[in-house]
Amino acid sequence: MSRPALRRVLNNRKPFNLCGVPAIGCRHQSTSSPASSSVPSVKENELAKIIRDTIKSTGPIPISRYMQFCLSHPTYGYYQKGDVFGEKGDFITSPEISQIFGELVAIWFLTRWMEADSPSRVRIVELGPGRGTLMDDILRTLFSFPGISGSIKSIHLVENSEALRKIQGDKLLERLEGKEVDLQWYTGINEIPETNDTYTLFVAHEFFDAMPINTFEKTDMGWREVQVDNDPGYAQNLPNQTSKSGLRLSLSSAPTPLSTVLPATSSRFTNLSTGSRIEIAQDSFKIMRRAGELISKGLGGCGVVVDYGGDRSYGQSFRAFKNHKIVDVFDDPGNADLTANVDFAYLRESLAGTGSSSLGPISQSSFLLSLGLQPRLRKLLDSATDEKRKADIRKSAQRLIDPLGMGGQYQVMGITNDSALRVAEGGEIYPFIKKKEQSRVLKP
């Protein structure tokens, strides 16, 4: 599982910040809009009431805790509601758009496995597998190569949602039928055992964007935390309320335990100017570090992290998606996906001392084109039975590499065990090498 990233809507519109306008540099604040003069009676959001009661009892809560409430609450959490992916869900991911995505990830895995002298025992680890589409495409591709096909011994999926586990199982067990491959689920990456005799393939696609974040603002008195608080002007079903859920963002007046610790975890934050805001996903740091440890153990390994974001920090990327549209993060808690841009530099810093190193990141378009998107597209077009199918295949492939959409907004970071990087030619591993971006124009 992966989640987390932009989603389908960002392929067709400019990125929005929390002010609800496509402007860069707007202060991080609630996007709640004034209600109309006549507000119809609506059923109260039960999760919003739970959150308001919690704040009333204990005081303002970190944004990370708000995200945990909304995404993972056992009864009202977003990811407890089943299949939220695809055209009928709230967002669509690259693997759901075209099989080429998963096939080319598998090809990169294959090349790294061969460079490692083709170990006879291989396991595949995925964080946030969604519907299981990416893993299914990876397995289908790898099983078509006799050498690695017989080497794959186990699949390890990190997934908390029982509903999604069932969807994943239904898809993958069919793919694994007749093969001696063990399929296991875990609630966290720390549950995955280390190994002494296995090569690890690791993938996290749109996983880190769903990790809970904490937001901090640098003031003249030091770092202060941006928190979720009750809106004093809220009253259900009354006109002119400032928040649909009775929640808003506020700035702590004094240091909090998190504002004292988290901004100090990266030297990049030290020299930021007063008024700067940063979003920090502490769980991302811990999870990525553990991934680096798994990849460095045993016979080594490699991995890819694919998400929207960049090789820098962000301060105002926290947003919500519902029905493929950006909505206010406080509009409907538990019924919208919450997400934030991924700070790939922070993920890279987490790998220090693990025995693994990062590669890139590079754009998704560069990654896919370098690994053969165009020849694979031609093959699919040749096998298509009618013109409509050909047009659909071509359109889907173009979406993956569109520089104004997924191709530019999504970044791909590779991971490798340090020993493999030391023997790599020039200390670089393809396609994560310093070069000019390839043409993004399809020429089927």
Image (cartoon, grey):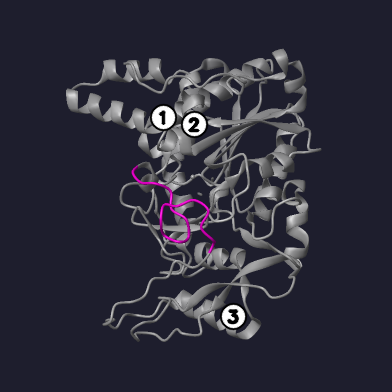
Relative depth, front residue between 397 and 417: 397
Q: Which quarter of the rendered picture does the C terminus lie within?
A: top left
Q: Residues within 10 Å of mark 1 (few under 14, many from 20)?
A: many
Q: Residue at x 55, y 83 (%)?
A: 53
Q: Secondary structure at mark 2?
A: helix
Dot 1 or dot 3, earlier in sequence:
3
What residue would you read off at disc 1? Answer: 401
Q: Is residue 198 visible?
A: no
Q: Is residue 330 above or below residue 380?
A: below
392 part of magenta stretch: no
Picture quarter containing residue 187?
bottom right
Q: Secondary structure at mark 1?
A: helix
Q: Position of residue 366 (x, y in %)?
A: 50, 25
Task: Give the label on residue 364, or none.
Answer: 2
Q: Secondary structure at mark 3?
A: helix
Q: Residues within 10 Å of mark 2 (few under 14, many from 20)?
A: many
Picture quarter containing residue 291?
top right
Q: Position of residue 428 (x, y in %)?
A: 68, 19
Q: Is there CB contact under 8 Å for labels 3 and 2?
A: no
Q: CA distance from mark 2 to mark 1?
A: 7 Å
Q: Position of residue 140 (x, y in %)?
A: 45, 27
Task: Give the label on residue 438, or none.
Answer: none
**Residue type (three-letter) at the residue carrying disc 2:** Gln
Q: Is residue 234 above or below residue 289?
A: below
